[in-house]
Amino acid sequence: MVATLRPKSGPARSYRFPTFSDERLSSGLRLLTAPVSKLPVVTMLVLIDAGSANDPAGKEGVAALTAGLLLEGTAQLSGAEISEKFEKLGTSAESGADWDSAFVKLTALSDHLEDAASLLGQILQRPAFPEREVERLKAERLAEILQLETEPRGLADEKFSEFLYSPDSRYSKPDEGNSKTVSALTRTDVENFFRANYRTGSTTVILAGDITPESARALVEKAFQNWAPGTAESQRLVATARTSRKSLHIVDKRDAPQSELRVGHVGLPRKIPDFFPTLVMNAVLGGLFGSRINLNLREAHGYTYGASSFYDWRRGPGPFVVSTAVQSDVTAPALREILLEIDRIRVKQISDEELSLARDYLDGVFPIRYETTAAIASALATLVIYDLPPDYYDTYRSNIRGVSVAAVLEAAQAHLHPDLLQTVVVGDARAIKDSVGELGLGDIQVHHS
Amino acid sequence: MRIPVETFRLDNGLFVTLSEDHTAPIVAVNLWYHVGSANEKAGRTGFAHLFEHMLFQGSAHVASNEHFELIQRAGGTLNGSTWLERTNYFETVPSNELALALWLEADRMGDLLPAMTQEKLDTQRDVVKNERRWSVDNQPYGTMLEKLQELVFPRSHPFEHSLIGSMEDLSAASLDDIAQFFVTYYTPDNAVLSIAGDFDASEARALIGEYFGPIPRGKGKPPLPPMALPPVFGSPLREVVEDDVSLPRLFMAFRSPVFGSDQYYAASIASALLGMRKGSRLHRALVRERQIAADAGAFTLDLAKGSDLLVVDVTARPEIPVAQLEEEVEREIDSLHRDGVSEEEVRRAQALIETDLIASLQSAGERADRLSMFATYFGQPELINEQVDRYRAVTVKKVNELVKERFGEDNRASLIYVPREGVETENLLAAAVGAG
């Protein structure tokens, strides 16, 4: 039979996050290069400080539309020609905007990188924003919004943000805009947004993979040689809570077999002094398979396929949320367990076993996160977006190991707010309203979509 | 570029593949059991997948959920997944934890049953039912795979029934079923073990021998019923599903050559030129130019037995009636079937696929999984190094032969989702199309 004795760990081999160069080119562009020569591939990621948080009021969605349109035409090339050119090189560029930045990225075999980079340069320097493509991408976004009405997970996320933030907060609306704002966007809005935000001084090019800093510099200087230097004005973000009282929103979905649950409140901006204790606290609460919330809801009760909690890290205070889907008839007991877990971690120190599970996992898994050039590029993007120190990844593991049970308790008490919880249930209102109403989750509103 | 591949077999039949790469202190352990939903008996749909859940509920020397905990404590990631033809279990761990990962896999392969209880089965049954609700029943188009299987495979063909299973069959599963399934399929001679990443081959061999060596060989598994199918359906198949969706969506499936065959690579190129990325035919014609589709793509299921499926997937724009969607997709397929493909299109597809193949080998977990796949299906893990060449060898002529044979009207199965509010109109439309 199988050996009954558990093997012990061998001696750990050291690991270092790839070293990278960080320089400012004469045009004002910032360039980060991480040489990793395992395979002949390179990821190129261009990051522009032009995320959805920069959308002017009433123009929500323009950042995402602008980023999408970068690939849809230049002065010389149509959108179809752009796709064709990239794809013949065995790559395809992807562009978009998240809350804090716009991006264009691709992964190519080393042999094709120079041509792909040159094309990417043209796209960013001379986008044409053809009217026809503006209208097409708007229509595709409107189709996506329509799809969301029958997609409980996405709908729950969106409604949660809407009920969490004050209406004048950018975070209260979807990052890609809602049907009202998107319908109203024009080509001029896109051009204005582009001109105001896409500047060399607000742009970072990241290259990770089979390339040296010297060749990266030559490549980027050539590809972006026609981009006039400039810096964008910085923006002020409004992200305030909609209410200081608990409330419960039921979004009715007749006969739904499950209830999608979101429970939480306005969370924290990414750059906070107690980031690491907060990260470990959330790992114990709901960030891991072996976390309290998942073991409780899934493994002890079988209410769900999975349950988790997370801080949605952004430059501004993104949401803190517990997220799960449970079978309809256990909606109320599942919510009760979630509330109990949020309370429990604020009252009593977690055990040493819980701390070591979270800490050892976050420490140990670190090298596994950076196996690919795309993952390394994205890690470097995190440094740029949140203005983290250059040795962030070199000190990450010792920072994780330095977190104590006392620090976790402090983080829980400081950053979890049971009295502010907003609850969204997308589910069958008739079936669940009475039992859920007894939980003391605040005033109930039922919404029919 | 080639990755190193070393293989051996233990006396009990366990097939092992090793692939060293010392660039980072990470190692992936990956086990494929050659059993999937295709092996389920009547009245037990979903059992292979439910069983996969039970493998995380402990074994003789591992407590319930401890497998997860030990790997996560070691700084590793892990999971398992079930498919029609196989079930896999995998962990990626810091390289100094290789022994732990191997020992955990060996403990559940050798000694699972002492840990199985009715209570654990009941809980996991509830978890899986919730997985079904979450990913199938309460998700737009979530029933696509099971509806498609039912539409395109003959009754009682092993690929015909649902992978996640019916609620009724899940309820019926018993501890007896667990025991029987375990001794029949979870045996070393029905499994492949792959290790990729930072390890020493001789140490790995010693550990494998120590942990897996004592596990007895199985008594053989019942053969699958004949799986072979004619190359085409024979006549068009069609099903309209009224569902809680916002936009009509058409899945058009074609019987296609099995994964790994010469013709498969031509089919895979055909699929890519039809629906991979924005430069593909369908995206270009339907999304960009005619603007009748919100999205368009194509993929193959990569089934290695019987017959594979190539699936075209097109979602309508809001104002487009489903009949128009269907017509325009048919027209694209007709023109492909009639006029064939160009050299340029084939090259585009080859270039994209090649980059994806190489980029995917960056991750130790992916390497190990592909090694297990080629070893399980073909007994040849080294095929991992031949994929780029296989794709490069596909010519326009080969794609055109494939297209001629497989894209005719006699080989199209259309699964069409329409919004429930539109029930009456859609019925009329369906009737009109059927009568036409």
Image (cartoon, coloured by chain):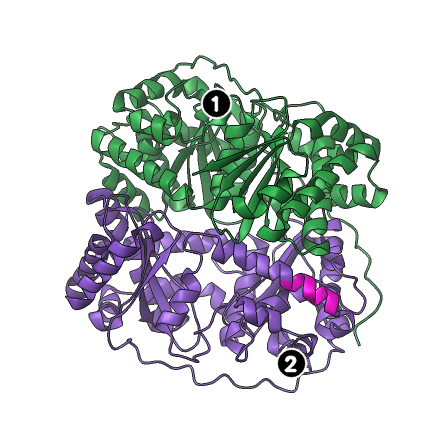
Chain colours: A green, B purple
| Tag 2 secondary structure | loop
Kind of residue at disc 1: Arg
Which quarter of the figure is the C terminus of chain B placed in? bottom left
Task: Output the chain of dot 2.
Answer: B
Side of A150 relative to B294 (left or right): right
The kind of secondary structure the magenta stretch mainly shows is: helix
Front residue of this view, candidates B90 and B389? B90
Which element carries disc 1, helix, strand or loop?
Answer: helix
Q: Which residue is mark 2?
A: B13
Residue kind at label 2, given as amino acid type: Gly
Magenta residues, as a range?
A: B118-125
Residue plotted at (35% across, 31% down): A179
The mark found on residue B187 in the picture is none
Q: Quadrant of residue A28?
A: top left
Q: Nearer the viewer, residue A74 or A236?
A: A236
Label 1 Cα crowd, 10 Å radius (few <14 / some 14-19 / many 20+) = many
The residue pinned by badge 1 equals A170
Place of residue A62 in the rendered image (x, y in percent of width and height, measured from the top left): 36, 25
The reply to whether residue B192 is visible in this rendering is no
User: Which is nearer the eye, A445 or A379?
Assistant: A445
Question: Looking at the image, is A108 positioned above or below residue B313?
Answer: above
Residue B3's place in the image compared with A72, above or below, is: below
How many numbered discs sit on the rendered protein? 2
Left or right: where B119 falls relative to A123: right
Q: Residue at x 48, y 23 (%)?
A: A170
Label 2 and label 1: CA atoms lie apart by: 60 Å
Residue B140 percent coordinates (x, y): 42, 52
Is the residue A265 above or below the residue B363 in the image?
above
Q: Position of residue A37 (x, y in %)?
A: 53, 45
